[in-house]
Image (cartoon, rainbow, N blue to C red):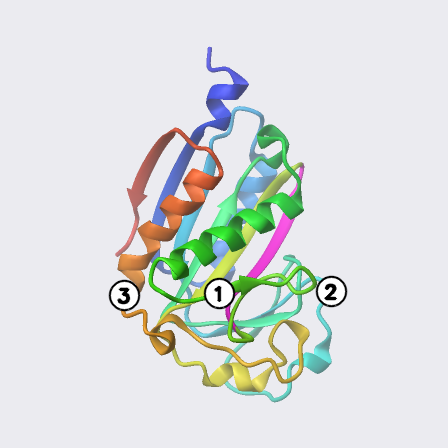
Amino acid sequence: MITALETSQRLNIRYLGLQDYLTTWQAMSDLSSSRDKQTIDEIWVVEHPAVFTQGSAGKAEHLLSQSEIPVVKSDRGGQITYHGPGQLIIYLMIDIRRKAFNVRDLVSIIETSIIQLLSAHNIDANAKKEAPGVYVNQKKIASLGLKIRKGCSFHGLALNVDMDLTPFLQINPCGYPGLKMTQCINEGLTLSLKELAPILVDKLSQQLHYVQIESFSHEQ
C-alpha cells in the first residue's frame, strides 16, 4: 500500500509540445475533477497557438482591439493574457492539501523558481506581491494564473522565451494598462524553449519537494 507521504513525493512530467488551448484546458479540468487522494501530481509542459485567455474575473475592457486571434474565457484566476508559440507554458496539477501549503505558497514557489532560473543567467528579476508574476526592469517576463478545485491546483505559468510580443499591445496585460512585456531573448538569455523547459521544471520539482519523478514525452 502506497502511503499519502509517498504519493505526495511522486510527480509525473509530461512534455506535450504545441497543443490547442481549449483541448489542453479540458484535459486539465478532467484530471482535476476525477483525481483522488492516490492520484499522482502532474506537471505539463506545452506551447499554444496564438490565443488570448480571459481569467474568471476578467473584464472585457482589457481587450483593446479585436483581431483574428481568438479570445477564450478561462476559469483560471487573473485577467487577460496572450499565449503563442515561443512561450513556455507549465501547468501544475498539484494536490496542495496533501503538500500542506496554500495558494500563496504555490504562487511564491512558482515565482521563486522562475527568478532562480533567470538569475542563473545574469538576469535580475523580481516578484510583486500585489501583482503576481515575474518582472525584469518593471517589464513582465512571466505571468501566473491558477485554479483550485477540491484542494488541487491546475493552470500555471507562462514564461516569454522567444516569441512575437506584438499581440500584447492589443490588451492590458493581466489587467494593467501600459504594462510592458519582455522575454528571455530580449534580456540576453539565448537558450531555446526546449532547453529552458527541463531546467525550470527541475527547479519547480525541487521547490515542491518531489523525490520520485517520471518524465513522458508526448510531442509529435
Instruction: Of the two numbered discs 2 and 3 on the same chain, state the one appearing first in sequence.
Output: 2
Instruction: Of the two numbered discs 1 and 2 on the same chain, state the one appearing first in sequence.
Output: 2
Q: What is the three-letter code of the residue carrying label 3?
A: Ser
Q: Position of residue 73 (x, y in %)?
A: 64, 66
Give the crowd class for mark 1: few <14, some 14-19, many >=20 residues within 10 Å: many
Instruction: Give the labeled residue for mark 2.
Output: 57
Kindly indicate whether the residue at mark 3 contacts the one at mark 1 (C-beta within 8 angstroms).
Answer: no
Spatial CA span between label 1 and label 2 = 27 Å
Q: Position of residue 56 (x, y in %)?
A: 70, 62
Element under disc 3 = loop
Q: Position of residue 95 (x, y in %)?
A: 57, 35
Element under disc 2 = loop
Instruction: Of the two numbered discs 1 and 3 on the same chain, state the one appearing first in sequence.
Output: 1
Q: What is the three-letter code of the residue carrying label 2?
A: Ala
Magenta segment: 140-150
Foreground of the two, 45 or 190 = 190
**Magenta region, mostly helix, strand or loop?**
strand
Instruction: Give the labeled residue for mark 1.
Output: 125
Element under disc 1 = loop
Spatial CA span between label 2 and label 3 = 33 Å
Relative side of 193 to 158, left or right = left
Give the crowd class for mark 2: few <14, some 14-19, many >=20 residues within 10 Å: some
Can you tell which mark lies on residue 192? Answer: 3
Foreground of the two, 220 or 47 = 47
Q: Is residue 187 visible?
A: yes
The residue positioned 50% from the left and 80% from the top of the image is: 69
Can you tell which mark lies on residue 3? Answer: none
The residue positioned 33% from the left and 34% from the top of the image is: 214
Q: Is residue 164 above or below residue 129?
A: below
Give the crowd class for mark 3: few <14, some 14-19, many >=20 residues within 10 Å: some
Q: What is the three-letter code of the residue carrying label 1?
A: Ala
The residue positioned 31% from the left and 63% from the top of the image is: 193
